[in-house]
Image (tube, helix red, strand yellow):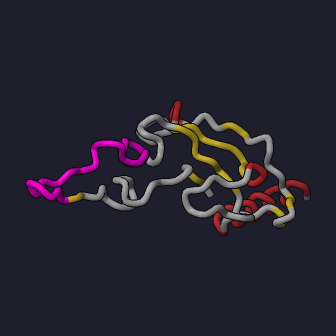
Amino acid sequence: MASSGGANLGSGGSLFPRQTRRRRGGGNTTTGDGAGGASAQGGPGGAGRGGHIHVYDYRRPPDYGRIPDPEDIFGSLEVDGEGKFVDGHGNYQTSGTYRMCTRDGILGLSPFLRQRLIERLKQEEELLG
């Protein structure tokens, strides 16, 4: 699972369009170009500056838009202000704080990753004999 750290609802981000308001006087609409949320400033929550996407396990997924606990993060990928991977690969950095077993349980994998792990373990078993 991956998390970008969130998006602001109704601020012009990827979830809801920017809110428009009618002014009392002339009936003109504004598009919130003033002090809008970070997601209205060019990038999902990053104000067009880039950042990191955290790769974490399924043991205890965080609420949408929240960063998982450090013990649940495998590592992070770096993205630029346009949401593209830095250096084409994301400059992956391991977490250093990941714990395979916590009070919330053991490692939790998505169905896709679980299947890939099983396939790889079968290949290793065939090599051993």
Nearest the viewer among 59 and 110 is 59
Q: Residue at x 43, y 45 (%)?
A: 38
Specify the farthest residue to the left. 26
Q: To which quarter of the image does residue 62 belong? A: bottom right
Nearest the viewer among 99 and 109 is 99
Specify the farthest residue to the right. 129
Q: Residue at x 36, y 47 (%)?
A: 36
Residue span colored magenta: 22-43
Q: To which quarter of the image does residue 93 belong? A: top right
Q: Is residue 50 magenta?
A: no
Q: Position of residue 8 (x, y in %)?
A: 45, 55
Asked whether, in this view, residue 42 is left or right of residue 83, the answer is left
Nearest the viewer among 51 and 31 is 31
Quarter of the figure that contains the C terminus? bottom right
Q: Is residue 25 magenta?
A: yes
Asked whether, in this view, residue 24 is left or right of residue 4, the answer is left
Residue 12 against residue 42 in the figure, above or below = below
Q: Residue at x 45, y 42 (%)?
A: 83
Q: Position of residue 44 (x, y in %)?
A: 45, 48
Specify the farthest residue to the bottom. 111
Q: Residue at x 41, y 48 (%)?
A: 37
Q: Main secondary structure of the magenta part?
A: loop
Quarter of the figure that contains the N terminus? bottom right
Asked whether, in this view, residue 109 is left or right of residue 101, the answer is left
Specify the farthest residue to the top. 87
Q: Position of residue 26 (x, y in %)?
A: 8, 54
Q: To which quarter of the image does residue 117 belong? A: bottom right
Nearest the viewer among 78 and 33 is 33
Q: Position of residue 71 (x, y in %)?
A: 78, 51
